[in-house]
């Protein structure tokens, strides 16, 4: 390269360097301003994600179990012996474990006859002839009490005078030819059957009931009850009454009233409410 060329190249390089320096000087204030803005910018705040509101939980209504029922009985053999068999009654841990009879138009025959029609002072439990075991709102069964301390037929029912006995035997099982049902005892009361007393309560006239008549009947029973249990009975429920003699006075009867086991109920005893002043027959002995 000639001397002149080297001089020109040096001049060119010097010019370029000067130009770059000038351009840097022009860009410096802008760069410094940008740096200042970055350094003074507020910090980024990390915000939490908004909490999701949980969907309300829909609580399913508790399932109420249908009332339990007894195992079906086979009445074939009994009906072959006597077609007037209409059912079976049982109270656990008692001698009440017997066929139930019914004779058309006759409320006395099975007081003194057995299953085969033979004379028998013990008789058998029987349904009032005015009752229909399938249809009637109030079923009334009669049976003998053979005396204090006895247990045959309906004799053990006399023990229901004491709430403690109810608490051990709160349920009656009644089976018919079309199936069975458990009944919870809700009241125990006593009446006279002697018309001359003037205060007979004709409980057995309450058979085919509407709701209003049944409520009247329930109110009358509650006034006479030695005690009631649970929430008693509702005026639209079927009723079952067991009737037997009681020996505090002559011509007296003890009655055990029950209603069907409800859905969701157990077979255990309910709370007892003692009546401090039951309405008793006028002849009822004091302190009996």
Image: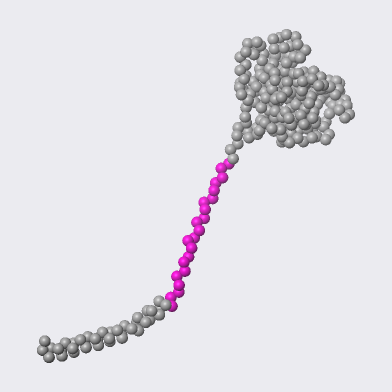
Locate the N terminus by quadrant: bottom left
Q: Does 50 appear in magenta?
A: yes
In terms of image quadrants, where is residue 29?
A: bottom left
Q: Position of residue 4 (x, y in %)?
A: 12, 91
Q: Is residue 26 above or below residue 278?
A: below
* Residue positioned 61% across, 24% down in the render: 71
In terms of image quadrants, where is residue 248?
A: top right
Q: Does 69 appear in magenta?
A: no
* Residue positioned 84% across, 28% down in the render: 280
Q: Nearer the viewer, residue 272 or 134?
A: 272
- For the record, the magenta segment spans 40-61
Residue at the far right: name it: 286
Residue 218 visible here = no
Residue 32 visible here = yes
* Residue positioned 66% across, 19% down in the render: 87
* Residue positioned 55% across, 46% down in the render: 58
Q: Nearer the viewer, residue 199 or 178?
A: 178
Apparent side of residue 111 relative to residue 68 in the rendered image (left or right): right
**Color encoding of the figure:** one colour
Apparent side of residue 146 relative to residue 30 in the rendered image (left or right): right
Q: Position of residue 89 (x, y in %)?
A: 69, 21
Q: Position of residue 40 (x, y in %)?
A: 43, 78
Q: Position of residue 225 (x, y in %)?
A: 79, 31
Prevailing secondary structure of the magenta residues: loop
Locate the C terminus by quadrant: top right
């Amino acid at each position: 390269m000639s001397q002149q060329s080297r001089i020109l190249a040096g001049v060119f390089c010097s010019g370029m360097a000067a130009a770059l320096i000038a351009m840097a000087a022009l860009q410096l204030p802008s760069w410094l301003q940008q740096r200042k803005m970055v350094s003074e910018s507020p910090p980024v705040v990390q915000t939490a994600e908004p909490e999701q509101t949980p969907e309300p939980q829909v609580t399913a209504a508790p399932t109420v179990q249908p009332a339990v029922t007894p195992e079906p009985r086979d009445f074939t053999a009994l009906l072959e012996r006597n077609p007037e068999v209409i059912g079976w009654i049982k109270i656990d841990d008692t001698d009440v474990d017997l066929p139930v009879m019914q004779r058309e138009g006759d409320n006395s025959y099975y007081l003194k006859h057995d299953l085969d029609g033979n004379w028998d002072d013990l008789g058998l439990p029987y349904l009032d002839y005015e009752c229909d075991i399938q249809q009637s709102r109030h079923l009334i069964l009669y049976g003998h009490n053979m005396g204090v301390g006895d247990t045959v037929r309906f004799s053990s029912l006399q023990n229901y005078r004491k709430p403690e006995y109810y608490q051990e035997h709160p349920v009656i099982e009644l089976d018919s030819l079309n199936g069975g049902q458990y009944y919870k005892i809700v009241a125990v009361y006593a009446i006279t059957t002697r018309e001359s007393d003037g205060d007979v309560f004709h409980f057995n006239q309450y058979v085919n009931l509407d709701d209003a008549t049944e409520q009247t009947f329930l109110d009358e029973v509650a006034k006479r009850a030695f005690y009631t249990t649970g929430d008693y009975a509702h005026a639209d429920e079927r009723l079952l009454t067991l009737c037997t003699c009681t020996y505090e006075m002559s011509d007296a009867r003890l009655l055990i009233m029950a209603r069907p086991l409800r859905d969701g109920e157990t077979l255990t005893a309910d709370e007892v409410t003692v009546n401090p002043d039951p309405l008793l027959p006028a002849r009822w002995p004091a302190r009996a």
